[in-house]
């Protein structure tokens, strides 16, 4: 293999196709995909998988010339496969890119950070990482984020000058009694030469009719409307804002890639609606007819979808982009019930992973919890699910969620919702279910068979 790999190196263009398809590169692709899935299921890193990287290990290639495998932007970590990976040279140039998937999947994109490989060396603690010595190189970017990845260059350059402080900080934290490797476990107290965790364990369960606490869950999945937030916030604030600003948003962003993708998704949905005779659906003319005519038809369709409270991805994706502008302009602020922040904090401190599953887009969910009346609550949340995993009233959707969360049994997940049909679907998938009874919620039928709570204090 070493001879074959070495022969694959081309002086003219770096590496030939034979080497890009070799076993070392294939194993690195598989490794990154597996890491992305594990990061997600462990609740460490949610969202898409841009710039997760791994060097291709091959003893026949000098370290300075070894290839780099990088995950694409825009692909959910839990759905990552080896074929989604980019292969880059050691200088950051793209040697191999993933194939584009059929619509409505977005085209793959390599992060703007791809060429930003910051290298540090001659640090004593590098030897603590397997395979590294004092003279080897290591990358540990600790920086403030920016709106665009390409703007990170200056911050990365500055960060490279202060890595040694990280090791000093880790030592100080340990001396103060904090276990830096597992921060959720709380402070560590030394007793007679041994360490013991002084943080308390909080069982997460539901009080039954005998006031006994039922078994705890590994994960909690929460609905938003009528569960974490008043229905009135959605119906009286978010929906009207999207409806009143859809035309303005489309005009101002019409030529952007994001809005073109929104329009393409709406076209597909409207074509399907017209075939099925859905009320309110009107044809969307082709682009050559003119911008004004296209936008007018889009506005008419979106208004009809909002009025019908349709739970479809095409509408929710556009609404999320409109709401983003509202939050950025301080015209919107998320609203959650008073008991929600304390409950989220308690569950988080207990090691319970909390997720959101709503018909609103994941971006809209992040906006609500990131800009709430109780501040940024996203630090207590491990991830977000929307209708891209399926309709909330379909059992298969909850099966998909349980697979993504990586639990041993679906019953390790507690789902809280205000909608009985969603409760039935989740229960059929094996999840434990509680129905949220909040002010303003629609009445629920008698004998529905599920536990109910009026506050998260009861969970």
Image (cartoon, rainbow, N blue to C red):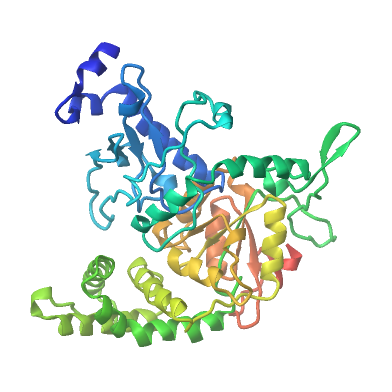
Residue located 72% across and 50% down the image: 216
311 or 364, which lies in front?
Answer: 364
Q: Position of residue 404 (x, y in %)?
A: 49, 47
Q: Where is residue 393 in the image (x, y as percent from the top left)?
A: 48, 63
Residue located 65% across and 77% down the image: 438
Q: In which quarter of the image is the C terminus?
A: bottom right
Position of 204 relative to 62 (above/below):
below
Position of 139 relative to 200 (above/below):
above
14 or 53, which lies in front?
Answer: 14
Residue located 65% across and 76% down the image: 337
Q: Quadrant of residue 175?
A: top right
Q: In which quarter of the image is residue 273?
A: bottom left
345 or 128, which lies in front?
Answer: 128
Extreme residue in the left direction: 288
- Tell me if 320 is positioned left or right of 5 in this view: right
Residue located 35% across and 51% down the image: 73
11 or 328, which lies in front?
Answer: 11
From this viewpoint, is residue 286 visible?
no
Position of 309 relative to 206 (above/below):
below
Q: Where is residue 366 in the image (x, y as percent from the top left)?
A: 50, 66
From this viewpoint, is residue 423 visible?
yes
């Amino acid at each position: 293999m070493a001879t074959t790999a070495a022969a694959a190196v081309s002086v003219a263009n770096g590496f030939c196709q034979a080497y890009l398809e070799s076993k070392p590169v294939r194993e690195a692709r598989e490794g990154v995909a597996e890491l992305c899935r594990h990061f997600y299921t462990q609740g460490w890193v949610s969202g898409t998988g841009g710039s997760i990287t791994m060097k291709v290990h091959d003893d026949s290639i000098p370290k300075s010339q070894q290839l780099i495998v990088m995950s694409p932007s825009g692909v959910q970590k839990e759905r990552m496969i080896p074929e989604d990976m980019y292969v880059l040279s050691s200088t950051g140039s793209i040697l191999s890119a993933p194939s584009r998937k059929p619509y409505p999947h977005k085209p793959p994109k390599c992060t703007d950070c791809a060429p930003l490989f910051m290298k540090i060396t001659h640090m004593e603690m590098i030897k603590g990482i397997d395979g590294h010595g004092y003279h080897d190189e290591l990358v540990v970017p600790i920086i403030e984020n920016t709106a665009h990845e390409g703007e990170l260059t200056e911050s990365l350059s500055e960060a490279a000058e202060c890595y040694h402080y990280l090791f000093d900080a880790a030592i100080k934290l340990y001396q103060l009694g904090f276990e830096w490797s597992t921060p959720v476990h709380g402070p560590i107290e030394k007793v007679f030469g041994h360490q013991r965790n002084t943080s308390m364990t909080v069982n997460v369960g539901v009080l039954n009719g005998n006031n006994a606490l039922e078994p705890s869950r590994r994960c909690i999945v929460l609905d938003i409307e009528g569960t974490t937030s008043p229905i009135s916030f959605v119906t009286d604030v978010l929906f009207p804002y999207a409806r009143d600003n859809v035309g303005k948003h489309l005009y101002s962003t019409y030529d952007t890639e994001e809005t073109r993708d929104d329009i393409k998704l709406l076209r597909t949905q409207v074509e399907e609606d017209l075939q099925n005779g859905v009320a309110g659906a009107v044809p969307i003319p082709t682009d050559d007819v003119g911008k004004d005519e296209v936008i007018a038809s889009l506005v008419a369709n979106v208004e009809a979808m909002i009025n019908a409270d349709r739970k479809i991805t095409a509408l929710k994706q556009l609404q999320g982009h409109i709401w983003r502008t509202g939050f950025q302009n301080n015209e919107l602020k998320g609203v959650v019930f008073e008991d929600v922040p304390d409950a989220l904090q308690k569950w988080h401190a207990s090691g319970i992973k909390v997720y959101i599953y709503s018909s609103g887009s994941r971006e809209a969910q992040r906006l609500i919890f990131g800009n709430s009346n109780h501040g940024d609550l996203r630090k207590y949340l491990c991830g977000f699910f929307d209708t891209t995993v399926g309709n909330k009233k379909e059992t298969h959707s909850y099966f998909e969620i349980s697979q993504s969360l990586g639990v041993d049994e679906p019953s390790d997940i507690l789902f809280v919702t205000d909608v009985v049909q969603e409760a039935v679907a989740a229960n059929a998938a094996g999840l434990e279910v509680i129905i949220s009874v909040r002010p303003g919620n629609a009445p629920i039928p008698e004998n529905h068979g599920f536990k109910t709570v009026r506050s998260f204090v009861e969970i």
